[in-house]
Amino acid sequence: MTLQLPVLVQTPAHSNLGGALSYESDTAHPPGTLVRVPLGQREILGIVWDTLEEAPALDPGVRLRSIAAPLDGVAPLTAAWRQLVQFAAQYYQRSAGEVALAALPPQLRELTGEQMARRLKKHQGASADKSSSTTEKSSLVALTTEQQQVLGAMADRTGPFLLFGNTGSGKTEVYLRRVEALLSQDAEAQALLMVPEINLTPQLEARVRERFQHWGEEAIVSMHSGMTPAQRLRSWLLAHTGRARIVLGTRMAIFASLPRLRLIVVDEEHDPSYKQQEGARYSARDLAVYRGRLEQAQVILGSATPSLESWHQSRSATDTDRGGRYIRLNMPSRIGAGSLPRVRRVDMNHQPRKTIFSAPLLQAIRERVARQEQVLILLNRRGYAPVLHCAECGWKSACSHCSAFRVFHKLDRTLRCHHCGFTQRVPRQCPACGNADLGMFGRGTEQLEEQMTQLLGDSVRADGAGLRIARIDADSTRLKGALEQQLAQVHSGEVDVLIGTQMIAKGHDFRRVTLVAALDPDGALFSSDFRAPERLFSLLMQAAGRAGRDARLSLAQGCEMWVQTSHPTHPLFDALKQHDYVSFAEQQLKERQLAGMPPFSAQALVRAEARTQEAAQAYLSAVREAGEEIVQGLQAEGFPLESAPLSLYPAVPMSLQRVANVERAQMLVECPSRPVLQAFLARWHAQLHAIRASHRQVIRWAIDVDPLSI
Ligand code: ADP
Ligand code: ZN
Ligand code: ZN
């Protein structure tokens, strides 16, 4: 007998072939089975799915094609995994086929059945010895009281938990103990540990491997975009077959096939890199909470500076508010009584104009390095001097393809656009007026490094050697392994002063750093993006957390965080001085509530790109009009639009309006109720496709649910 089976395949984005396609089969492959199916002239990977619900109606005359072959030896994906994909597709308004196939390792899509069989054989070595002993108790540190309390709460309740723990309070130790507890209770249980950027946390991977090495080589696998296709396939297969007990990965790992998932940890849960910025723009953190509930896996979100969303979601109940869904657990103390740095503000209004390093900061740096302590200098821009400029006629090094300025890179004397990559040699004279004396605006890490070298050139270390200054940013770490090597130099004490972008502020456990300086953080105070202060605060708190990690050093010498600012009395810096995330968060949340912004409302953005701004906006205006009609319909259906009004804002140019000669515009939809917004988006989505058909000038459009930058 011939059956008809729904099969998900990777359909082109926005082709509106969202759901599964129908194929004939002689065998009743269960849902979740990986199969190869013909599509057009090709044979591609598909997944037998549960329903056809989203599939377009077939013409009665069309003959169904047959499934070519199942991928033998690979067990079907679980119902929970399929549900996760279905939910993510629906919530983020993409097709299930796109989300599902993108979540599988690329090689799975490319290998033939034969090649696959060979791979499987290769990975079918002796299974890890699951009965083996737990970690030697004697090699474990004694837990602090706070760690014990937190672990006690996690043993008693299901969560999800927000672990609000200071930098260096021992959060990682809590994660590892929880992994140990859950995985030794159940010989098949699996844990997912997520980190923002794997390159920045090589120490975590080393710690996890060391702690759990008794489970065998295959028990711990990584998943991130820096791996080769072969490595990714290996990790995926080990997780899918249950041989891997711990998956350590970046946001993509949220879609790992883990048949017996019992724990999900999202470390540094506030980090923006958990949000995917293309394709299905999912938040791996939010999906972690969903997946945890779906699979009854415990979820731990950890941070010293939680996202305001998670903070709000973990508020306690009051008389008028039933509180958030997360359980907040606190670990305020740093291990070994290491103190947080004293925060010192330098009022740049009282410094000579164009001062880069104020005199007191320079003096402080000299003293630190003379004692062989280390200094971190944080600047949130890369390149030498962001903009080349002519004082005669006002010419600036604008990119001719983007609404952005090109950045001067001293090393190869080029002007480079950081958005489209357009690069030219630095002109000898002003292209507009011929003036040969071109100047700089602003400054970047490269210039800082040079300045620092000049200013501190005469300083020596305690051992008599010259001072060593290093720079870490996206430019200096482009080569593979460069970042690891540079970080190793910092750890080994070869480097005295480290200059860098936010890359240096995250997660590192530099033992000898006693002074951290932020040179020019003011831009974020007045940004048009309402999340800019939240990001700045968390960056500065993280940076401060890099200082004084060695309690002996910090007790002996005291450690400091310096902020050079023209707005020293800004409340954000007051809160920083007190290391007071709580009051900062409460104040920000109050402002957000008054303004009706997230987390007090849910948002979605539609973005459109076209050759002209008019064309991009015309499309958005049309979809806005269609949206207004949907709102009327929802009202008629009885959706509570009085208490949760849905606002459709007019189209505006994006803050970076033009990139590579393409104009960009966006429109915002906002609603205090997430379910109402979701109901709206579900109806609106088809319209976005339909209207596009009559706006041929639109090159691309995309929808971003819960956007992180506006
Ligand atoms: P966090 O993740 O909160 O920044 P970590 O877990 O990395 O903190 O802990 C900071 C340092 O303290 C690490 O070097 C870790 O090995 C150490 N540490 C953690 N817990 C303890 C403990 N209970 N006793 C002693 N040292 C600990
Ligand atoms: Zn450009
Ligand atoms: Zn000029």
Image (cartoon, rainbow, N blue to C red):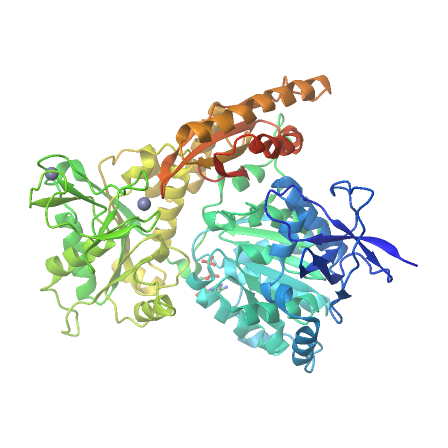
Instruction: State the residue in front, 34 or 267.
Output: 34
- State the residue lying farthest toward the left: 436
Query: In what quadrant of the picture does the C terminus appear?
Result: top left
Residue for point 87% across, 61% down: 26
Measured along the vertical axis of the image, is residue 672 above or below residue 298? above
* Along the viewing direction, whichever of 475 and 526 lies nearer the viewer: 475
**In the current view of this chain or complex, which residue is farthest to the right?**
1
The answer to whether 153 appears left or right of 186 in the picture is: left
Residue ranking furthest to the bottom: 126
366 displayed left or right of 302: left
**Residue at x 60%, y 69% (from the top left corner):** 233
When the figure is inspected, residue 3 is found, relative to residue 671, above or below; the finding is below
Q: Residue at coordinates 33% horizontally, 38% vertically from top-left?
A: 524
Task: Point out residue 284 in the picture as x, y percentages from the top left corner.
Answer: 57, 50
Find residue 694 and report its image quarter. top right
Q: Quadrant of the N terminus?
A: bottom right
Does 162 appear above or below 633? below
From where the camera sits, is residue 674 visible? no
Q: Position of residue 425 (x, y in %)?
A: 19, 54
Residue at horizontal 37 percent and vertical 48 percent from the top: 539
Image quadrant where residue 167 sits: bottom left
Residue 497 x, y percent position in the rendering: 23, 62
Q: x and y percent of residue 248 in the render?
A: 56, 64
* Viewer-side residue, 420 vs 129: 420
Q: Is residue 398 left or right of residue 309?
A: left
Residue 420 in view (yes/no): yes
- Tell me how many marks there are: 0
